[in-house]
Image: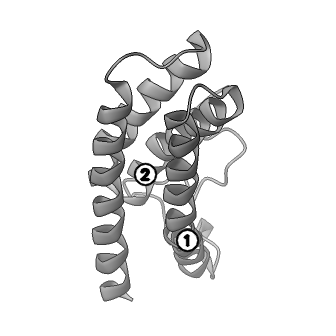
């Protein structure tokens, strides 16, 4: 499937070259609402990662590993689309760790320490992103 297949053409107009005649009147408001929903959902994602990591700290837990991986991977994929580039590196680290835990069924020595550090880095980046986004509102 082509990138953006099924999405309205005005939404995929990343270089803003499209004539505004095809853009819905409320497009800016719709995009602002999508951005707001992403921003407002970040603290819950951090908490989900933290909770899953706490469970994994107690011993391997397949459900926690899957939740951790899917949450980190989703954040890694969506953050750049919302201009949250500072989230990408720690989310990628967490996603990669989580994928291994989910696929291999085990947590390697020292990986939890790295995961906690990356989660702290991600949490701080999220706080900065939210503060900047709220300052722009």
The quadrant of the rendering that contains the N terminus is: top right
How many marks overall? Answer: 2
Residue at (51%, 69%) from the top-left corner? 35
Label 1 CA crowd tier, 10 Å (few <14, some 14–19, many 20+): few
- Residue 127 seen in the current view: yes
The x, y position of residue 56, in whole percent, is 54, 34
Mark 2 or mark 1: whose residue is earlier in sequence: 1
Q: Are marks 2 and 1 in contact (CB under 8 Å)?
A: no
Q: Secondary structure at mark 2?
A: helix
CA separation in Å, label 2 and label 1: 15 Å
Seen in the image, is 81 located left or right of residue 102?
A: left
- Position of the C terminus by quadrant: bottom left
Picture coordinates of residue 75, whole percent (x, y): 49, 47
| Colouring of the image | one colour
Residue 85 visible in the picture:
no
Q: Which residue is mark 2?
A: 79
Q: Is residue 133 left or right of residue 19?
A: left
Residue at the (57%, 10%) spot, across then down: 104
Which of the 4 quarters of the picture holds residue 25?
Answer: bottom right
Say what secondary structure mark 1 lies in.
helix
With respect to residue 40, does 11 lie above or below? above
The structure residue drawn at horizontal position 35% and vertical position 59%, both measured from the top left corner, is 123
98, 9: nearer the viewer? 98
The picture places residue 80, in percent across and down from the top left corner, at 38, 49
Circle 2 packing at 10 Å, graded few (<14), some (14-19), many (20+), is: some
**Would you name the residue on which mark 1 appears?**
31
- Relative horizontal placement of residue 136, taking residue 81 as reference (left or right): left
Specify the label residue 43 is tagged with. Answer: none
Q: Nearer the viewer, residue 92 or 32?
A: 92
Image side of residue 25 versus residue 136, left or right: right
Expressed as whole percent of the image width and height from the top left, the position of residue 68 reads 57, 38
């Amino acid at each position: 499937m082509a990138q953006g297949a099924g999405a309205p053409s005005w939404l995929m107009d990343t270089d803003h070259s499209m004539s505004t005649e095809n853009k819905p009147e409320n497009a800016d408001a719709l995009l602002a609402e999508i951005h707001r929903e992403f921003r407002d959902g970040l603290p819950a994602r951090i908490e989900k990662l933290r909770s899953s990591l706490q469970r994994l700290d107690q011993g391997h837990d397949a459900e926690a590993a899957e939740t951790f991986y899917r949450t980190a991977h989703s954040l890694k994929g969506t953050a750049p689309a919302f201009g949250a580039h500072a989230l990408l590196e720690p989310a990628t680290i967490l996603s990669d760790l989580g994928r291994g835990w989910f696929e291999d069924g085990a947590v390697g020595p020292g990986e939890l320490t790295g995961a906690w550090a990356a989660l702290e880095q991600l949490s701080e980046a999220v706080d900065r992103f939210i503060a900047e986004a709220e300052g722009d509102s």
